[in-house]
Each structure stands twice: as C-alpha cells, then as structure tokens.
Image (cartoon, rainbow, N blue to C red):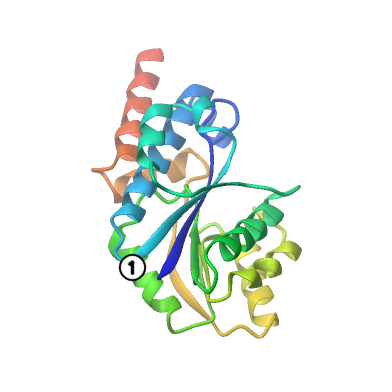
Amino acid sequence: MTVLLVVAKAPVPGMVKTRLCPPATPVQAAQLAAAALRDTLDAVRDTPGVTPVLALAGRLTDAEDAAELAAAVAGWPVLPQRGVDFAARLANAHVDVADAFPGRRVLQIGMDTPQLTPAQLAAAVRRLADAEAVLGRAADGGWWALGLRDPRQAVALRGVPMSTPRTGRSTWSALTGRGLRTMPLPVLRDVDDWSDAWAVAATAPGGRFARQVAAVRRAMVVRA
C-alpha cells in the first residue's frame, strides 16, 4: 500500500499564502489556505488503497478552522516537519515516513492544489507502481507531486533550490541523476498568487476553496 503524504503548513494568519495579500487580508489568506487544505485532505481520504499521513509545520490549534482541520485528520499519523529549509523539510518528511512505514512507496503532495480529485491521485499512485519516481510539475515551473518507490531517495531534494521557475526541471534532473527511472504526472496549476486562486477555483467550483475565493471577492466589493 502506498503512503499518500500531505506536506502542509498550519493556516495561521500572517504565516501562509502571504502572496495573496493584497487583495486578501492575512486572515482571509489563512482562510483560503485552510479551505485548500481541507479540500486536499478530503481528496486524500477518498482515494482508495492508500495510507494517509500529514507532515505539518506549525500547530493546527493556532490555525483558521482549527476544529474542522483537526477533525479532518483524526486518526491520521501527523509528523512534525523538521529541517532548516523547505528542501530539507521535504526530504526529512520522506525519511520519517520510511521509518514509520518500512517498504512502502510514498506519493507526496502539498496543500496548494485543492482542485485535485481522488481519481487523479489514484492515477498517480498507479503510475508510481510502474516507476521508481514520478514527478508532477506545476505550471509556474515548480512541482505539485513527488512519488518515490524508495522514499529515502528524497535526499536528492537537498540540492534543489525550491520555489523558483526551474524547481521542477531541477528536481527532475536530481532524480534522474541518481539513476531513478522517473515518469511524469500531469501538469497542474498551484495557488501562489491571486490570479492562481481565481484560476484554480474555476476548475473546482464546488470545493471549499472556490467558495472561499468567492467570499473574499464579495468582501473586496464591500470594501470598495
């Protein structure tokens, strides 16, 4: 069984999705992050044949929608993120899962693609069964998913600059440079700025994230 690992940051105002401000306020940005995370957790929960795990930075008790988020991950293993930078936290999360679930493949996603569906995640899991690594690149040059047959191979991430337009390409090179047979996943748009939020919400209009985007838009009209 594959471990489906969600790497996330607690949606605390001023700590998440700061590139949405403006037009969103810090509280609204945290509410958008909470909605995106809850949509992601729902998709993971509804994906058949996987073990869900959350690697968390921060505390859900400090987050927007704290009670709802706590209920959403009830029964999940929750691992604290550790490391001096994002690349280290990602690599360490894979190692921690390898320690907790020996011999399991790992498919890791974030909280920035709330449009993900269980069908898309299941397809990614199946693709990983035929490869040593899979990588889902993001439209901005980053990536939204990384799957590894041996999660300890995530050590390759330690030399990859994160959050740049070349992160996806550099990650692919790091994986193949270790001799891993790597296969691509579909390219998705993740949520970084307000234009991304609008575009992603439009692809999944029935989700919490889309409803929260609409609520922020209405608040903007009132403020104007």
Please give left or right for residue 189 compared with residue 155 in the image.
Answer: left
Judging depth in this view, the residue of 91 and 206 nearest the camera is 91
Which residue lies under the disc numbered 1? Answer: 122
Crowding at dot 1, Cα within 10 Å, few <14 / some 14-19 / many 20+, comes out as: some
SS at badge 1: helix
User: Residue 196 is drawn in which quadrant?
Assistant: top left
User: Residue 188 is drawn in which quadrant?
Assistant: bottom left
Q: Measured from the top left, where is residue 130 in percent x and y?
A: 44, 84
**In this orientation, does residue 65 appear?**
no
Specify the quadrant that holds the N terminus.
Answer: bottom left
Judging depth in this view, the residue of 160 and 44 nearest the camera is 44
Judging depth in this view, the residue of 176 and 68 nearest the camera is 68
**In this orientation, does residue 90 appear?**
yes
Residue drawn at the location 43% of the way across and 80% of the way down: 129
Judging depth in this view, the residue of 69 and 217 nearest the camera is 69
Residue drawn at the location 41% of the way across and 14% of the way down: 223
- Considering only vertical position in the picture, is 219 above or below 203? above
For badge 1, the amino acid type reads Ala
Q: How many marks on residues?
A: 1
Please give left or right for residue 194 compared with residue 165 in the image.
Answer: left
Residue drawn at the location 64% of the way across and 81% of the way down: 176
Q: Measured from the top left, where is residue 77 in percent x and y?
A: 48, 49
- Considering only vertical position in the picture, is 204 above or below 49? above
Task: Work out which residue is located at the far top of the displayed protein and give it.
Answer: 223
Q: Measured from the top left, where is residue 126 in percent x and y?
A: 37, 76
Q: Measured from the top left, where is residue 141 in percent x and y?
A: 57, 61
- Considering only vertical position in the picture, is 164 above or below 12? below
Task: Work out which residue is located at the far left of the displayed protein and give it.
Answer: 206
Specify the quadrant that holds the C terminus.
Answer: top left
